[in-house]
Image (tube, rainbow, N blue to C red):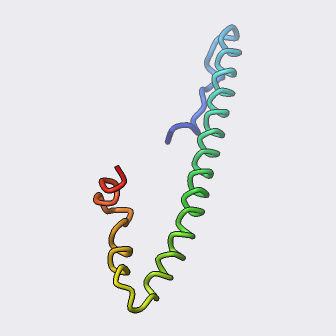
Amino acid sequence: MNMLHQRLSVGDVPSEIAPLVNGMNVVLERLAAGAARTRRYTANAAHELRTPIAILRARLENLEGLPIKGALLTGCRPSSSSCSSRRA
């Protein structure tokens, strides 16, 4: 993914091969554009998922006197493996 910005040089190739090299450069450009779209989509989706989770967490932290509060706050953290095992 890091090398999608590189293109093939047309200057040193025979004229018969130049259309092939140009075609490859077009393909590389399309791949780079697709990878950029995928990165933007993933970043936007992650942001859209983090926001409601942060709101729920803040509301849970402000609850007082609820016996289940501790279990709700620690039960399904993103880094917790116990959450995934309970879902199965």
Numbered label tally: 0
- The residue shown at (69%, 22%) is 22
- The residue shown at (62%, 30%) is 28
Give x and y (percent) for residue 43: 57, 56
Q: Nearer the viewer, residue 67 or 1?
A: 67
Q: Nearer the viewer, residue 63 or 5?
A: 63
Give x and y (percent) for residue 60: 45, 81
Q: Nearer the viewer, residue 78 or 86?
A: 86
Which residue extends farthest bottom?
Answer: 64
Which residue extends farthest top?
Answer: 16
- The residue shown at (47%, 77%) is 57
Horizontally, residue 23 falls left or right of residue 85, namely: right
Horizontally, residue 41 falls left or right of residue 74, namely: right
Horizontally, residue 76 falls left or right of residue 22, namely: left
Which quadrant of the view contains residue 21? top right
Q: Is residue 25 above or below residue 66?
A: above
Which quadrant of the view contains residue 68? bottom left
Give x and y (percent) for residue 67: 34, 84
- The residue shown at (65%, 22%) is 10
Which quadrant of the view contains residue 78? bottom left
Q: Is residue 75 above or below residue 12?
A: below
